Amino acid sequence: MNSEDKSAEMLSYKRHTLAHLLAASVKELYPLAMPTLGPAIDNGFYYDFDFDYKIDADKRGLNADDADLNTSKKSNAPKEDDLAKIEKSMKKLLATWEGFKHLEISKEEATEIFADNEYKLELINEIADKGEKITIYYSGPKDFDFSIESLKSNDYKLPTGFFDLCRGGHLENPSKEIEIDSFKISRIAGAYWRGDEKNKMLTRIYGLAFNTKEELEKYEWTVEEAKKRDHKKLGKELKLFTTSSLIGAGLPLLQPKGMAIRKAVEDYLWELHKQKGYDRVWTPHIAKEELYVTSGHAAKFGDELFRVQGKDESFIMKPMNCPHHMQIFADNQFSYRDMPVRYFEPATVYRDEKTGQLAGLTRVRSITQDDGHLFCRTTQIEEEVSTIVGIIKEFYTTVGLMSDYWVRLSLRGDDKSAYLGTDEVWEKAEGALERAAKENNLNYKPVRGEAAFYGPKLDFMFKDALGREWQLATIQCDFNLPERFDLFFTNEKGEKERPVVIHRAISGSLERFLGIIIEHFAGAFPTWLAPVQVKIIPVRENHIEHAKKLATVLRSKDIRVECDISDEGFGKKVRAAKVDMIPYTVIIGDKDIEAGVVTLENRDKGKIGTPTQEELLAILIEEIRNKK
Ligand SMILES: [Zn+2]
Ligand SMILES: [Zn+2]
């Protein structure tokens, strides 16, 4: 186990330990609460309780008054306000938890110990049915004698500490190993016993836990920040995109401002590709089913395909662009001198995702891929992949996501029969991908068994400003589609030779990418991406004419500009530009006009000077061109 895995394991032990501590504290504060199950989860832990367990007072050795408490109509479950009390009690109890002890017990003993808890009894029966060991874990003062005899003699009640049915996986000394401020109780919610809505609704208490107080605070900051940056919220506030119930779920519409960003991304992607020998192609949005039967996509996408019925023929909305590009290649009689052939097309594909899974721009039914396919000889794979890696690095460096990334090199698994293509071609392709990764100094990890059945691939994962990981760019070798569509070119000997297809996407889906960068930049886009790059604000009515003229000049230089000629006061206009996070504000007043200059303000730096019109153009054009 490496140190990273080791520390992840320790953290999960800590979270699991805290679930016990939570149950113990709840039992202390709410003696009638019935603990059920409580695991570690990826940001902490939870425990489910039945606070309104119907009791058999006799069986539980309670007096009738206690029993009455639980037969009242009012739920005994704690409220949001009670969480602080539970957390406080946990922190107090933690000091006395010096270790865990465990006992392996028989089913009969377990049934006796947990006689009053039908939830635990259900679990005990399941464990016994599977023939697994039944263990109970005690935590409390180190010198406590935890044995089946002492348990029996105390009628299964402990004078100190707490025990639970459990498989193990705890910290050795919680009181020493758990930093008191590194965990907290976060919220309370309803949850069905074992997640089944036919079962009773229980009360789930959630806690957050990290290695240190700092990590906990960072996590909480991230969650809050993610809410503020949510692209669905910002997309609405900044008028970037919308949805319409008349159009349907998962079919977002880009407002002019959202489209300006997407166009800037698309143009940049094309700029990076056209220098590398790519050609633009265009393909229609529907095709006959036969195309996708041949490509294999009909079987792959199944009921996710949208079907279109014409008068005489039926069609399918394309779920992928690849088969279309294969048809363009097939129409040519290419020779080895023409290879590689490279097509580029940002194109929309359609998949009928379940309505419940659709959200904002990240889960949609209309997905625009910055798609491209290149057809090459096996000997050309390395150079072509290297070129694409170069494009990916340049693109993500510009967008500011290249500082924290890793690449998965997905290779064939051991069962070679599960993959299409000869050993020779696989070895060549895998070697070419790995060498391309090395040459480009990529931070890559080879993973066996992760390749598609049709070829090896490189997948790029990037971390955004909040440290969330996104799989975006991909480069995939494909030996399957050229076979299925019988694609070939003529080699030096005049024979037919099969090309290899390389699928590549840089931004992935343009919709999802827009969602990610809205959140990454929190709406404060760099100038080259900003929907409005410059806001011109005339100080008074008599400056409007001058402002409009300047706007026309900027527009003619492809600068996205807005002129605020509303009736609002000057101060309010300046604030509005700030709220919209516009990179540059140009103010025009009497003094500016007299001196033949403008007053220029930057979103981050404040006032930066009074340039002339020529100087202003130079500043803006330079910044937009360099995508700073
Ligand atoms: Zn446990
Ligand atoms: Zn493809």
Image (tube, grey):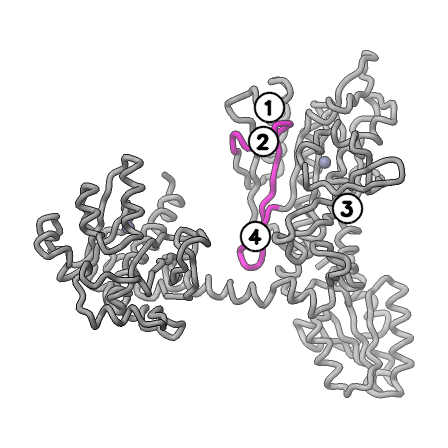
Q: Of callouts 4 and 1, which one flags the residue occurring earlier in the amino acid sequence?
A: 1
Between 134 and 396, which is closer to the camera in this rendering?
134
What is the spatial separation of the Cα atoms under label 2 and label 1, in whole angstroms?
Answer: 9 Å
Image quadrant, ligand 2: top right
Q: Amino acid at mark 3?
A: Thr
The correct choice, above or below, for 318 with respect to 192 in the image is: above
Q: Which residue is mark 1?
A: 419
What is the spatial separation of the Cα atoms under label 4 and label 1, in whole angstroms?
Answer: 31 Å
Q: Amino acid at mark 4?
A: Lys
Q: Which residues are magenta?
A: 447-471
* Mark 2 neighbour class, 10 Å CA radius: few under 14, some 14 to 19, many 20 or more: many
Q: Of callouts 1 and 3, which one flags the residue occurring earlier in the amino acid sequence?
A: 3
Q: Position of residue 130 (x, y in %)?
A: 31, 36
Q: Amino acid at mark 1?
A: Tyr
Q: Position of residue 19 (x, y in %)?
A: 32, 57
Mark 2 residue CB less than 8 A from any atom of ligand 2: no
